[in-house]
Image (cartoon, rainbow, N blue to C red):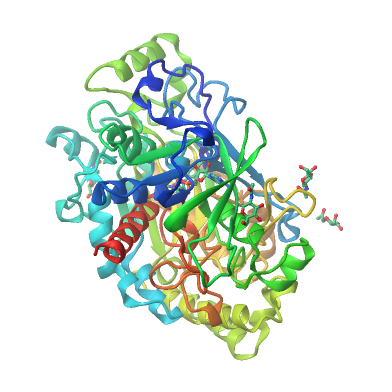
Amino acid sequence: MSLSKICLLTAVSWAGLTAGLSTRHANIKRQVSQLRGSYDFVIVGGGTSGLTVADRLSEAFPLKTVLVVEYGDVQYAPGSFDPPADWYGPNSFQSAPLWVFFSQPNPEYNNLTALTFAGQVVGGSSAVNGQFFDRPSRFDLDSWTQLGVSSDWNWRGMFPYFRKSIKFTAPSSQVAQQYNYTWDLSSYGGTTPIHASFPPFQWADNQAVLNGWREMGVRQRQDCAGGDKEGLCAVPTSGHPVTAKRSHAGLGHYADVVGTRSNFDLLAKHQAVRVVYPNGVNSGPPTLEVRSLVSEARFNITANAEIVLSAGAFHTPTVLLRSGIGAANVLSSAGIEQILELPGVGANLQDHPGSTGVAWEYTKPGNWTPMPEEMADPTFKADATAGWNEVPARGPYTMALGNQAIYISLPNTTPNYPAIIRKILKQTADGSAASFLPADYRDNTALVKGYKDQLVTLSKLLRNPKVPSLETPWSTGYSTAAILLHPLSRGTVRLNLTDHLAQPIVDTRHGSNPVDFDMQLANVRWSRRLLDTPTMKRYGAVETAPGPAVQSDAELLAFIKSAATLSYQHPCCTAALGPKDRGGVVDNKLRVHGAKGLRVVDISVLPLVISAHTSSTAYALGEKAADIIIKEWTP
Ligand SMILES: Cc1cc2nc3c(=O)[nH]c(=O)nc-3n(C[C@H](O)[C@H](O)[C@H](O)COP(=O)(O)OP(=O)(O)OC[C@H]3O[C@@H](n4cnc5c(N)ncnc54)[C@H](O)[C@@H]3O)c2cc1C
Ligand SMILES: *[C@@H]1O[C@H](CO)[C@@H](O)[C@H](O)[C@H]1NC(C)=O
Ligand SMILES: *[C@@H]1O[C@H](CO)[C@@H](O)[C@H](O)[C@H]1NC(C)=O
Ligand SMILES: *[C@@H]1O[C@H](CO)[C@@H](O)[C@H](O)[C@H]1NC(C)=O
Ligand SMILES: *[C@@H]1O[C@H](CO)[C@@H](O)[C@H](O)[C@H]1NC(C)=O
């Protein structure tokens, strides 16, 4: 299983929409005429963070009204492995409720384009993602204070919300023993029906590679959800512990609660166009202008208390830019009148890029069974499908993408890490840092200052042996992925100049800071050592990629570029937390600097991409933001 396939396999076919959902969502609105005259809270985007906020606000304030405006609709959201249209069969993108983003061709990667998705559905990306439910390292969040973010957002400040945001159910002791799953219950404790659990299935070759890593000295962690995760981790799946069906915000924070909340409305099939401040940015909340996707008609929606933008890392900046909130040069090139100078809007784009780490063939196969190839056998597949429909569910379909990963720090990846750290610090000392930024923000003092602070902060993170720099998720197969967790390159999200409502122009700019390639080289060199371990030698593992002929840095770099995956589906950071004079877009209460009654609550607010996949953090952000908002509006 190649990891580039993992990116794609989440885009499964949506055949077999279940009947009966319409009654479960009886109060969904599809026309503005069905709405109330005004709402206290208006949330833009019914995704992972947005629905978390909407659920908590409507629960806390029975007398206040909450409206969620969502571009997509309610749709059945299967998991990555659900039969019959699973990724072992032909994938279909046609009917998937997905936003698709093709980035600008990347000159550092032979003009490769990053392919990124997002959920276009009630539930957002949590309804289409790979269900891999890991959490960041405590050091990720603790580093934000060095960027001017309040210590409210450090690990101690956020951990209670990570705990609250999901309901973890332990597997049976038999399953735990069989697959070596370990955990620490004190990392969990939530009761909300966003489920996390470990599946009762692994492919039979799974242990070979895990043992190889142990032989390389990777330490097996008992728990990785409590802030310390350098090592080998068992990672929960966001699925139901008994049925194994996908758990997501559209269920746990909407369908499961909305029946008892007469104050919670959802307007589907409408695009938020912009916020409008008729009397200036100091006089909020603004009005929300929306567009019907059916009639194209536009309407204004009145918010009495505030508007919360939760449209995700690519679309939240588009709403801000269309509203006239952003950098003067960016807005003027789009012909939009500026109402607020905030250069961080659509800047600071980050994601996890990576490449194949190592690929091999076993010349002395382990005669493992079951293996994914067996899904081609009709009898095996029929049994797998039957198992999926049993209660409790069993078999391969319960596993989603896999449940293990290693997270290795830079010092544990390469003894040459001090040279890499020195290069980063040299960029900030000699001023060359700015030259790696997009041309049109090099002369913006706030963005350059923010970036230099980030590089200094990253130099500290990366030399810490407890902070992961490389991630390799694992379930089965003949190759590994080497994912770069803390890239230094920064990209942009801008409006399409001819059609502001179309998909934005995304430029990931991966590799624009050359130190990213030093780290990728270290990651691939480290990954190759797997094949030297006794376990892999026992099975006669022979390297097929990069391949024995590829040895020099130049050869290896060419390999990395040819085997690159430019997006592991974790775009973030385009409306970052932080002071305005360092490129921040939102303050410590997630209020857009200088704009009354307007907040951003989604994965855009991260200042730096984390050492983890991003959904657990999107939920935790929603929980913490809801607490902030509830406190503010409680008399
Ligand atoms: C294919 C894929 C696989 C992934 N795999 C994993 C994984 O295995 N593990 C993991 O932890 N993370 C994974 N992620 C990432 C994770 O799911 C996201 O980072 C997270 O869910 C983002 O949450 P969010 O609230 O910021 O945005 P979203 O959940 O994307 O919500 C944004 C919502 O806003 C709506 N919207 C956008 N623009 C507008 C507008 N103008 N008007 C109205 N509505 C609008 C969208 O339709 C969407 O519903 C994956 C993501 C994808 C796309
Ligand atoms: C990438 O595209 C640019 C612009 O079209 C072109 O000049 C350049 O030669 C291309 N590079 C490669 C490696 O194809
Ligand atoms: C379980 O983990 C131990 C090391 O912690 C390892 O030696 C053993 O092979 C593993 N067994 C299985 C079945 O995973
Ligand atoms: C929304 O309100 C603004 C400000 O009052 C106005 O300029 C705009 O035309 C309105 N839009 C619609 C669709 O009514
Ligand atoms: C911008 O939008 C127009 C109209 O939808 C589309 O034809 C064009 O390809 C888009 N431009 C880019 C660079 O994506």
Question: Where, by quadrant of the figure, is residue 320 drawn?
Answer: bottom right
Q: Position of residue 244 (x, y in %)?
A: 30, 29
Q: Is residue 38 visible?
A: yes
- On screen, residue 85 above or below 184: above
Where in the image, quadrant-wise, is ligand 2 located? bottom right
Residue nearest the observer in this picture, 539 or 322: 322
Q: Which residue corresponds to the image point at 50% horizontal and 40% vertical from the top-left?
A: 70
Q: Position of residue 122 (x, y in %)?
A: 45, 36
- In this view, the residue farthest toward the front is 37
- On screen, residue 202 above or below 407: above
Q: Which residue corresponds to the image point at 64% horizontal and 84% vertical from the top-left?
A: 445
Question: Where, by quadrant of the figure, is residue 589 drawn?
Answer: bottom left
- On screen, residue 527 above or below 584: above
Q: Which residue corresponds to the image point at 22% horizontal and 28% vertical from the top-left?
A: 242
- Report whether 279 appears left or right of 138: right
Q: Position of residue 139 (x, y in %)?
A: 35, 70
- In this view, the residue farthest toward the left is 173
Q: Which residue corresponds to the image point at 46% horizontal and 54% vertical from the top-left?
A: 303
Residue nearest the observer in this picture, 298 or 591: 298
